[in-house]
Every structure is written in C-alpha cells, then in structure tokens.
Amino acid sequence: MALVPRLDQRQSQSLVMTPQLQQAIKLLQMSNMELSEFITEELEQNPMLEREEADRRDDIHAPDVLHPDEIGDSDLGGVDVTDPVALSDIDFEAPAPTELSTTSGLDVDYENIYTSNGIGDDQTLADTPHQYAEPAFSNSAHSGGGGFESSVPDLEQVLSELPSLRDHLIYQLTMDFANGPARMVGLYLIDHLTEAGYLELDIDEAAATLGCDAELVADTLTRLQHFDPPGIFARDLRECLALQLQDMHRLDPCMAALLDNLELVAAREFKKLEAVCQCDAEDVADMIEEIRTLAPKPAMGFDQDMAQLVTPDVLMRPAPGGGWILELNSETLPRVLVNNHYHARVRKEAHTKDEKSYIAEHFQSANWLVKALHQRATTIMKVATELVCQQESFFTLGVQHLKPLVLRDIAEAIEMHESTVSRVTSNKFMATPRGIFELKYFFTPAIASTGSGDAHSAEAVRHRIKELIDTEPPKKILSDDKIVALLRAEGVNIARRTVAKYREAMRIPSSVQRRRDKAALPRTK
C-alpha cells in the first residue's frame, strides 16, 4: 500500500474551553474571600470596571450603569454562548423573580440576586428589615433539638480586649531585670515562646546564638519561670504543672512522684500510682483532682485572636406563614459595574488599531465578568433552594432526620451537571436557624435500612451513635456490638466496623476506656 497525501472530511465534536468559559467555571468554585481578591485584581487591571458605590445603587438610571440584560451576546468577546459545546450550564438569562409553590414550604427571594451582584437593582439586601444578626440563630452546627431558641449571648457581650502576652511579660521583665545582658536574654526567650506558653528552645543553642554563657541563659530562664502566669516558660507538660504547683506551695514529694509518672495517670493505673507515690488511693485521687484544676497551656488567656467567623453566602430564615425564605448575602458578593460612560469617551479618542483593540478587549472582558458574576449568584441560589427542599426535615426536626443525598440528586432536580453542583457547593456556606453549614454538609452517603424503609443518612447515624454513648449508664457501657444491635433494632443496617469508624472519627474512646474512665469517677468525690 502506497503512502500518498490526500484530503478527507471528518465530522467530530469536542469541548472547547474558551478563556471566558474557564473564567466562569473558576468563579463558580471560588469562596467569597477568593472572589473578593479576584475582583480587586480585575478592578486594578481593567479600566472599564468600577466598584459600585452606595449612591449609584440607589439610582438605577445612572448613565454609566450597565445592567446585565443590556449586555448582548455579541459583546462577549466572540464567544458563541448558544454553541452546545460551551456548556449548557452557563446560561446568561437574567432570572425573573420567582416564588416556589407553598407546598414545598419554601419562598425564594430572587429579587435580591441582582442586588447581591451589585448589577443594577434598586433595592439592596441590607435595606430589608430582616438582618441575620438575630440571636435566635443557634451557633451549634449539630443541634438536635426541634426548637430555634438559643441562649447564646450577643457578640457585644462576649467581646473583650485581652492583654498581649508579650507585653505582659516584657512589663515584668522591665521591673525585675536591671542587668542589661540578662534583659536581652529574657527578650530573646520571650520571642521564642509558643502559643501555649512553652519554650521549645535548647539553652546551649540560645547561648550560641546570643554569644553568651549558657549559665546566663539558664539563670535567666529560671527567673522567667516565676513570672505570671504560673507555668510560663516550661519546656514540657510536667515542668508546666510543677511550676504551677510550686507557685501554690503544693509541690511535695508525693506530687512530684505523680508528675514523674503522668503516663500512669493517663492509663488509669491507680494501683501502680499508689506504689510509686507511697500513698493510699484517696491521696492519689485528691492529687489527680488537683492536677485537673491546673492549666496545661498557661498562655491561652493571652493573645487570643477572635475566631475567624464564617461568612455565609446564603441566608435562610423562617417565613411568617410557614416554610422558609432564602436570599443571598449581599455582603459576600462583589458589586462591580461596566463603566459605559468612560468606554464611550475613550472609544471616541482612540485612533490607532492597538488602542481600539485594547479598549474593545477590556470592554468585552468587563461585560463577561458582570454576566458571570450574575450567573454565579443565580446558580448558588438554585442549588441552595433545592438543598433546602430536599433536607427540609432536617431544618424542622433535627440532624437525626437528615436524608441521604448525593450530587446527582441535586443535579437532576435543577438540570445541571454534577460537576457544576460540586463547584457551587465547595467553600459555600448557608446560615440556617440551626447554625451555619457548608453546602457540602447536606450531602451524606446512605446507610441501608433493615426492612423496606428508606435509607438513613450517615450523619444521622453518627448523631444517633453519639446519643447512645452519651446516655449509657456507667455500669452498662455499650460495646460496638451492642450499639450495632440497638441500631438494627431501630431499622439501621450497619456493620460493627462502621460503628467503630464513626466512633473514632468523633474521638469517642472504646468501651474499655470509657469503662475505666467512668469507674474512676466515684474516687474523685
């Protein structure tokens, strides 16, 4: 067979990922902080974009505000959004205000989608009377009760300014150390404390770094270990507890022997402790109880940064007549606009081909970004709405009624691909009356039922296992096999190794360890 060149026609389909399409997919999986950083970079690079100001949001007739409906497909940089290759999930039709049927028990506030994106609506979410700083929202992510009441104090009641550990120690250093070299060594050791207040630094290494005698470092450390708080500058847990007991004048030989054998305390080997400490069981119990009152991390009362609160992307609240109302959190979504006025002015002043190309490219990119942000908000609302519909029993009855759910169930309900749902639910959070949850929390594998009933959610089964262990009597500790029998009696077909895996994931000790722990409780009375 001779090898000769020839021309053939072939018809094939392939997925073409245009830069604009890649950007839209990337925006879907971004968290609110990542999205905010991305928008800031785009505002710096694209002169056609500008951040929406409050006064402009109040005036929808501003000449330089470009509403998403005003952006034609021809403005999207030559991308054919009607092409089936360009992913059917990326639909740029602006959603009309929609209210689901009352039978679903859910009302969706789609009007806030425009405002949350900052693309031209005349009412902002912040203007609505329903704010999500209500104390009725529980902070517990695994509340099992049916009510929505909460006794959690307001934020203003728990906020307080804690003193800096470094400043606290430097103040004592200044008062107690008059020697210049010793003070410099003290400053060096203070700067090498861990967050818990321990000193993970070798004395010889510190002396070599500072170029001084190791004896000076050791003497300085001994003096620093008498600073407040007690236990500071310890090099291990035993020394930390010993320093606190020494400050209380309670470090006698029996207590020192107990501290030298902390592994026996952890193992509940009380008979061996009695022999080592040369005392009876009552004295051992008293010493253990006294150790429990000490602080294993003496620095935790200082330099405590406020926990980084999760900012929800979706806000959920009960509707007055029953059901639920969902709306996007306007504070988590950027408000950017295409500056039409500026584009028209610079386009008239452009003379060269490169200038016109630059202006057209950035204008098309700005149009596409505004559309993509609007589509991202719409998709998040669609997914969150369907999640609430699927898991309504969880919100009304508790975690034990969480239904098994997979990405395919949501994708089929909203007619999107599973990968799109996966991107939308990554790093997205929803504030509910039961707490703030990541959207992926509601996807749990199914555990089969022993009969013909519905399958059980893995999260609900874990919650039930914890309930059984929390309520077990001290004299009847439940083994994993017994928990399996109780769950099967309730209709949950589960294996013993699955129970053990769930128990270990919740950091619940084995039945043997729990029996030892509860058997030791009467001794400490």
Image (spheres, rainbow, N blue to C red):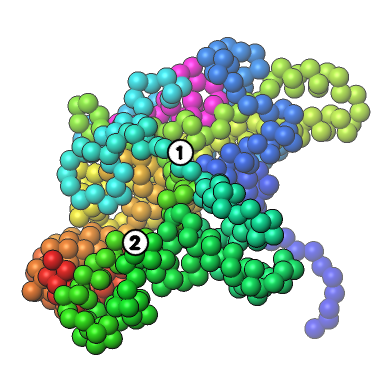
Q: Earlier in the sequence, mark 2 or mark 1?
A: 1
**Of the residues tagged 2 and 1, which is closer to the observer?**
2
Q: Residue 426 location, x and y as percent?
A: 47, 51
Range covered by the magenta-colored residues: 105-123
Q: Residue 239 location, x and y as percent?
A: 44, 71
222 with respect to 484 (left or right): right
Q: Quadrant of the C terminus?
A: bottom left
Kind of residue at badge 1: Glu
**Relative depth, front residue between 512 and 316:** 512
Above or below 318: residue 172:
below
Q: Residues within 10 Å of mark 1 (few under 14, many from 20)?
A: few
Q: Which residue sits at x=52%, y=41%?
A: 32
* The label number, if any, that marks residue 248 in the structure image: 2
Q: Which residue sits at x=62%, y=19%?
A: 65
Above or below 221: residue 276:
below
- What is the distance, in whole Å, between disc 2 and disc 1 at their CAs? 28 Å
* The label number, if any, that marks residue 161 in the structure image: 1
273 with respect to 260 (left or right): left
Q: Which residue sits at x=80%, y=83%?
A: 1
* Element type where label 1 sits in the image: loop
* Element type where label 2 sits in the image: loop
* The label number, if any, that marks residue 218 in the structure image: none
The answer to whether residue 163 is seen in the rendering is yes
How many numbered marks, from 0 up? 2
Above or below 129: residue 184:
below
Q: Which residue sits at x=25%, y=63%?
A: 462
